[in-house]
Image: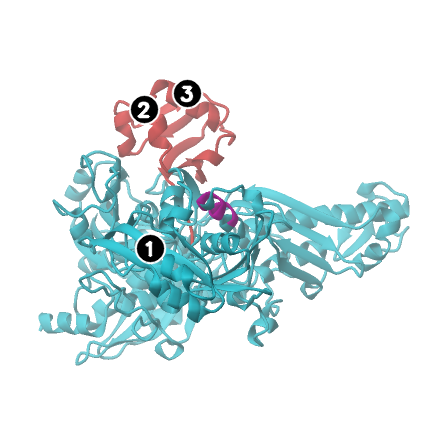
Amino acid sequence: MSERKFRQVGTRPIRHDGLDKVTGRAQFGADFSLPGMLWGKVLRSPHAHARIRSIDVSAALALPGVHAVITGRDFPEVAAESAAGGEGATDFRDLALNVMARDKALYHGHPVAAVAATSVRIAEEACKKIAVDYEVLTPVLSLDQALAKDAPILHERMRASGDEPLPEGPTNLASRREMGRGDVAAGFAAADAVVEREFRTPMVHQGYIEPHAVLARTGEDGRAVVYCCTQGPFMVRAFSAKVLGVATDTIKVVPTEIGGGFGGKTTVYLEPLAILLSRKSGRPVKMVMTREEVFRATGPTSGTHIRVKMGAKRDGTLTAAEAVLVYEAGAFKGSPVGAAMMTVFAPYKLANVRIEGWDVVVNKPKVAAYRAPGAPMAALATETVMDELARKLGQDPIDFRLVNAAHEGVQATYGPKFRAIGFVESLRAAKAHPHYRAPLGANQGRGVACGFWFNAGLSSSANVSINEDGSAVVMSGCPDIGGSRASLALMAAEELGIPVEQVRPVVVDTESIGFNDLTGGSRVTFATGMAVIEAARDVVNQLRARAAKTWEVELDAVAWNEGRAVAVNGAEGKHEPLTLRQLAARAAATGGPISGRASLTARGAGPGFATHLCDVEVDRETGAVKVLRYTAVQDAGRAVHPSYVEGQMQGGVAQGIGWALNEEYVYDARGAMENPGFLDYRVPVASDLPMIDTVIVEVPNPMHPYGVRGVGETPIVPPLAAVANAVERAAGVEIRELPISPPKLLALIEGAR
Amino acid sequence: MARVVFAPGLRRFTGGAESVEIEARDVRELLGALYRRWPELESRLAEGTAIAVDGEVIPNGEALFEPLRPDTEVHFLPQIGGG
């Protein structure tokens, strides 16, 4: 595999969807309309925790222009049932209650009713006329509050699950799990240096630019067509069907272009509401969230409280590690603490390790997936403790990590043995980079941090069809959130032996292709790419058969070489090669149109590892941090389109820097988010960041025909710690809390004086 | 014989056993053998669990027909998602 010479893979063509996007022609979720369309709006709870005594919608229904109003009573009871989703398991009962509250509002912004009217203004006016009688309850806004004795309980029926000891009776602790091996106490006793620290990180949002949007049309036969921006059209179909209690095949989902997701569009919010409003009104219904609604009522990622303890010998060998990870799930169980447990020490060789994970409900929006869910906060803890251990032992931070770095054959801390991985290679590349040796000035510091993410395989289907002129169409059911159209087209072009410009990649609806799991887990270029390669090979075999028929030779006398059928195995020189264009033109005469398809469950997603370097300058008067230089090194297995691999790395770093320095959900005492807009929820903009340098390391994944690994999530894992370590070295303080905003850092600097 | 390794939280269902060797052709046979031996394990593993088979992490329900080699190592892990 590593010997294969690629002609297309590894090149940097302009993406097929690029021109439409930069000229504004691409159609995103809110760009779709239908004749007779109504506008839907959601009435949301003004309380973070309240019992809903009654809802009176009569005044709203009486308003001219209002065609339908729905509340929790319009939805069927949904049984507790678990299914794989973007954030691991999704409980459909919880999902249904999150989409529309029934007896209780569990966060500020929780939907309690929805209206369809002839204009947005009338729909908003109608929402104001809906009378909801609330019994306001004390909100639970932090992990400490949630776990305190006599804490208000969010779900009276919920009991803690998992590993003992567990509290008895109603609790806000959804689950507690343990994993580990070896003798941790003996490991710490054998250490020459031990570091233990606690960290707190706030809830943060993915910050995708495009708000959630949907247009649903339900016909007289009850069948619905849904246009929406989502990472998973098949997920929208299945989840909406569950919430509404209808058969999956009554819903068709057409994915629109998507303006960012990062995991946040791996569940449903508006879609079941729009379908139900459309069914009730008999008209198409369009719903578009405001930015404020996106912040208040879609899934950010968990706020956390993490304790990590690690020990090492003088020679740098780690002897033991222990972590307690407590994660906010939001209003319903299901934080990414399981992934956090598995990733927290994954980059390192450790014989003695103990990890505990708590999943805790609070009166905040239910968390959704966010790029490597759960891992960045865990890595913040591990990598800052690693950095302090290196300082204590007088070791170079990269050398210290190299001593302990996992490699092929090492038993991961979460259990299984690693196959071929590129962690050591990423560390060596970072150490060799000129950035690592560049001098630093006063009040400047350099941070090193590493990160790991599993990457996913899951199920994918792909079709490759040949047009009559010899060009090709690649069909996928996975929305393109990171340049996957380009990577899928490149892989098809590689197999077919034609220029990538002659391959048209398209994302199609749920009735035009076999099942696809959602775009997530950095899986599309890996898994759907595998399906595309298989489908293209199917096409190549058909093309060879057509040539064999034309030449009246056996199939094994025809090889496919650079887009042409050539005679081999004794037939050399007897027949002129036939190009794909020629074979396509004769397709009707040789057996009909040519198309290939593949459906598979991809195994062998190779884990991704990264090492990041970050230089910052700290203003000791204001506490402001400026990122001066940033270099991200990552193993991509095989970079199919290097520009989009680099783009993923840069995007992950930018989001991670925002998480480290600025971003946080700020709540008032009643549980209302105080900063639900981009002016006050400060994501980094171009002027905040330096050019983010990238180095792609390629250690091929032996389980993929080209060696591909997922690349989209790993790059957000190290930046929180890379920034924190740089600030610690620049300012001589100890970071225990994110974001490292100016007032917080100033307080630390003044405290250290 | 496939070797099944139990995380600390699962050991209360296995009488404290940290690992066990099971003769099985695939995951379905292996789970059947485990549940016959420790019936309480079944409901515990149904709670959002993934199975790692020789390093391949697979959602529990999707792993049933995964073949096992004589030296295969099996771990039970929390089910994870991706963004």
Percent x, y of residue A58: 37, 57
Q: Name the residue under label 2.
A: B40
Above or below residue A402? Residue A703 is above
- Magenta segment boundaries in residue numbering: A237-243
In front: A570, or A538? A538
Closest to the camera, between mark 2 and mark 3, is: 2
CB-based contact (under 8 Å), mark 2 and mark 3: no
SS class of the residue under badge 1?
Answer: strand
A113 on left or right of A489: left
In front: A301, or A196? A301
To which chain does the residue with label 2 belong?
B
Q: Quadrant where the C terminus of chain A lies?
A: bottom left
Kindly indicate whether the residues beneath marks 1 and 2 are on one polypeptide chain.
no
Q: Which of disc 3 and disc 2 is earlier in sequence? A: 3
* Alpha-carbon span between mark 1 and mark 2: 47 Å
What's under tag 3, amino acid-wise?
A: Ala
Q: Mark 3 points at which residue?
A: B33
To which chain does the residue with label 1 belong?
A
Residue A443 visible in the snapshot: yes
A627 on left or right of A19: left
Residue A207 visible in the snapshot: no
Q: Chain letter for red?
A: B
